[in-house]
Amino acid sequence: MTDSLPSLAFAGIGLMGLPMTRRLLAAGFPLTVWNRSPEKCISLVEQGARRVKTPAELCAEADIVMLCLADTRVVRKVVFGEGGIVEGAKPGQLLVDFSSLEPAATREMAAELESRTGMRWMDAPVSGGTPGAEAGTLAIMAGGHDDDVERVRPILAHLGQRLTRMGAVGAGQVTKVCNQMIVACNALVIAEVVALAEKAGVDASLIAQALAGGFADSKPLQILGPQMAESRFEPIKWHVRTLLKDLDTAVRLSREHDSATPLSGLAAQLMRLHGSQGNLERDPATLVEMFRENH
């Protein structure tokens, strides 16, 4: 069976990359992995993955090379840096980038990679967090050639419940920015709500269930509401720095297109303030501390 499946490679075995690669291995795909800190690959190697020492080596046997990395700078380094993907890439191969990057940088890198190697690029940022990655229920928003999106659709069905082509390369990243604007503003207002409810004498731990199914309900409310009410900030499922990075991208994108984003602009500043107080690596549930007195 595995002979007929495309050979995959994956760079970035982090909070999202680890459960995603586990699902691909469980589905029987031949998988080669690379991570900057190699010890994160150990459990995958035990599950049958092959580990390589440089990103360039990912291209040796792979039909499709996947990335799930921290930001634009890291992706640029892994693709174009020393020992990078550009050194091993070949025509016919496809790069699928699950990272959340700046749309303009994505388009520039895609054009450069294709002109230098013939390898095409598809941006495919995801939403759903680590629970979605573990369950294979991510929402995947793609930018790229129509035939490239269709080529990976059966593979990505193991990772997500939905894959939507949003347009040409970069369109997936624009959609992810829109997603993060909604998530981050939601997270901040949930923090305000929990702190206000506590001060006004309401049991804030009941808010998420009280509002479930109503007009104010959302995934962030159901996940963050109880965590904030109970001050349950571990284990860390995602990071304040990620939301800050994406809000900064939103503000930059809004300037490029002369489009007003006042709520996201304010959210970026509040997120920056919270991050500057030593919270960048903490869970966004900690945002409630900004609105509590004497925390």
Image: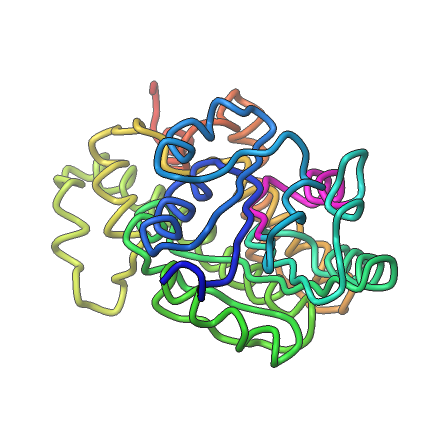
User: In screen coordinates, is 204 left or right of 178?
Assistant: left
Q: Is residue 246 magenta?
A: no
The colour scheme is rainbow
User: In screen coordinates, is 173 left or right of 41?
Assistant: right
Q: Residue furthest bottom?
A: 146
Pick whichever, 162 or 13, lies toward us: 13
Identify the residue at horizontal 71%, vertical 40% (top origin): 78
User: In screen coordinates, is 122 left or right of 155?
Assistant: right
**Quick check: 39 above or below 258?**
above
Identify the residue at horizontal 25%, vertical 69% (top origin): 215
**Quick check: 223 above or below 216?**
above
Q: Where residue 26 appears, x then y in whole percent? A: 32, 50
> In this figure, what is the number of numbered marks?
0
**Quick check: 69 above or below 111?**
above
Q: Is residue 72 magenta?
A: yes
Q: Quadrant of the N terminus?
A: bottom left
Q: Quadrant of residue 294?
A: top left
- The part of the chain drawn in magenta is 66-79
Identify the residue at horizontal 28%, vertical 53% (top origin): 135
**Quick check: 99 above or below 227?**
below
User: In screen coordinates, is 78 left or right of 65?
Assistant: right
Identify the residue at horizontal 55%, vertical 35% (top origin): 241
Q: Quadrant of residue 112?
A: bottom right
Q: Where residue 68 appears, x then y in whole percent? A: 55, 46
Q: Quadrant of the C terminus?
A: top left
Q: Where residue 39 appears, x then y in whole percent? A: 48, 22
Pick whichever, 226 or 191, lies toward us: 226
Q: Where residue 285 appears, x then y in whole percent? A: 35, 36
